[in-house]
Image (cartoon, coloured by chain):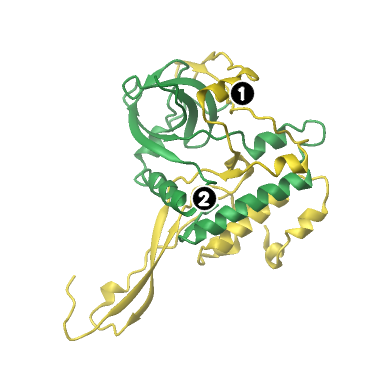
Chain colours: A green, B yellow
């Protein structure tokens, strides 16, 4: 049974042990809230001195050490060229070192909202189902983005 | 690399960029969000940030742990059609791309075998139960692979009206593991 409700902070993957109120990039960004997590990263709401709010995706130490780590930056930027709106907008990348001396690649994005999965899980009354019209809207938008990506020979690969 | 002047070599290279790690799953389909600090604070007021809870890991270290709280919006699973129509869903998570160069067409290859370069077939980092047949058989990955995965994702999202499952059925559905 896992000790942690979300990412395993004691995992050898090396998740960045972010804390609310912690500052990054020489004090420029302050961590305000956790937005999400995944197998290779955790994402945090960060705020700077000018009240700019951004989403900071912090890769695990293992993901950062992967030679293909920099590819995400490349593909996100390529995707932005293909899709005028519909993919995350990457603003900046930098590295942070945690207390154990491990390096973490940080990707700064414009903020996005909750996921369709969050929406689905909100229906606790009917088996976490979604109405047809919502599924149709999701599929329509995502298919449109995939088609735009394909014009630049990018596939999502999922 | 040295090319003999006695041979004319015409090489058209088609480059396919493939992002193999991300999955076309509902957790990567994200709502648009407000951006201004003032608007975000209004949204966050509906869902105050939770305080961290300290949990001691197997390494004996105490970690302040917080749960994920995306920026809330007014949409719910009960949102009406004419409301959800005005939002936009973003496709997120382009982790770990991989570029594959295929030798598309070449004229007159003599001492140019080094030019007939083909990388290894890209791999997908998608759960195997929704991978397209070409990913399992080592075939060529392209846009249709994305469409296949998207269709499987939709079929796995429970919906109250089963007809939509049949709407997205494709001739290869019988090959779903």
Q: Are marks 2 and 1 in contact (CB under 8 Å)?
A: no
Q: In the displayed structure, does residue B74 sit left or right of residue B123?
A: right
Disc 2 chain ID: B
The disc at residue B125 is 2
Residue B134 image position (x, y, % from top left): 56, 64
Looking at the picture, does residue B126 appear above or below residue A63? below
Closer to us: B78 or B14: B78
Place residue B152 in its image quadrant.
Answer: bottom right
Please tell me how crowded label 2 is: few (under 14), some (14-19), or many (20+) other residues with Cα within 10 Å: some
Closer to us: B8 or A142: A142
The answer to whether marks 2 and 1 sit on the same chain is yes
Q: Quadrant of the N terminus of chain B?
A: bottom left
Q: In the displayed structure, does residue B126 sit left or right of residue B168?
A: left
Q: Is residue B131 visible?
A: no
Disc 1 chain ID: B
* Residue shown at the point (41%, 21%) measured from the top left: A50
SS category of the residue bearing label 1: helix
Residue for badge 1: B43
Closer to us: B156 or A24: A24
């Amino acid at each position: 049974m896992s000790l942690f409700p979300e990412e395993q902070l004691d995992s050898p993957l090396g998740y960045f042990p972010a804390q609310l109120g912690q500052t990054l990039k020489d004090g420029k960004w302050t961590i305000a809230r956790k937005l999400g997590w995944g197998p290779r990263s955790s994402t945090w709401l960060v705020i700077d001195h000018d009240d700019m709010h951004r989403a900071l995706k912090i890769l695990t130490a293992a993901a950062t050490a992967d030679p293909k780590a920099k590819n995400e930056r490349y593909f996100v930027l390529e995707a932005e060229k293909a899709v005028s709106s519909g993919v995350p907008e990457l603003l900046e990348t930098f590295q942070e070192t945690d207390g154990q001396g491990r390096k973490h690649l940080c990707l700064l994005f414009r903020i996005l909202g909750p996921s369709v999965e969050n929406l689905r899980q909100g229906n606790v009354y009917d088996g976490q189902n979604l109405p047809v019209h919502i599924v149709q809207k999701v599929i329509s938008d995502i298919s449109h983005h995939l088609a735009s990506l394909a014009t630049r020979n990018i596939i999502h690969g999922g | 690399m040295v090319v003999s002047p006695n041979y004319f070599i015409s090489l058209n290279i088609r480059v396919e960029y493939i992002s193999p790690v991300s999955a076309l799953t509902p957790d990567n389909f994200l709502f648009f969000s407000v951006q201004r600090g003032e608007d975000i604070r209004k949204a966050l007021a509906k869902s105050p940030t939770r305080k961290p809870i300290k949990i001691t890991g197997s390494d004996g270290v105490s970690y302040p742990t917080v749960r994920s709280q995306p920026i809330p919006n007014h949409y719910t699973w009960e949102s009406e059609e004419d409301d959800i129509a005005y939002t936009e869903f973003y496709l997120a998570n382009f982790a770990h791309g991989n570029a594959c160069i295929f030798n598309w067409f070449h004229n007159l290859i003599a001492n140019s075998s080094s030019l007939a370069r083909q990388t290894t077939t890209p791999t997908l980092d998608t759960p195997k139960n929704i991978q397209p047949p070409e990913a399992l058989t080592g075939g060529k990955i392209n846009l249709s692979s994305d469409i296949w995965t998207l269709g499987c994702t939709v079929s796995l999202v429970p919906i109250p009206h089963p007809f939509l499952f049949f709407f997205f059925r494709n001739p290869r559905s019988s090959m779903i593991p």
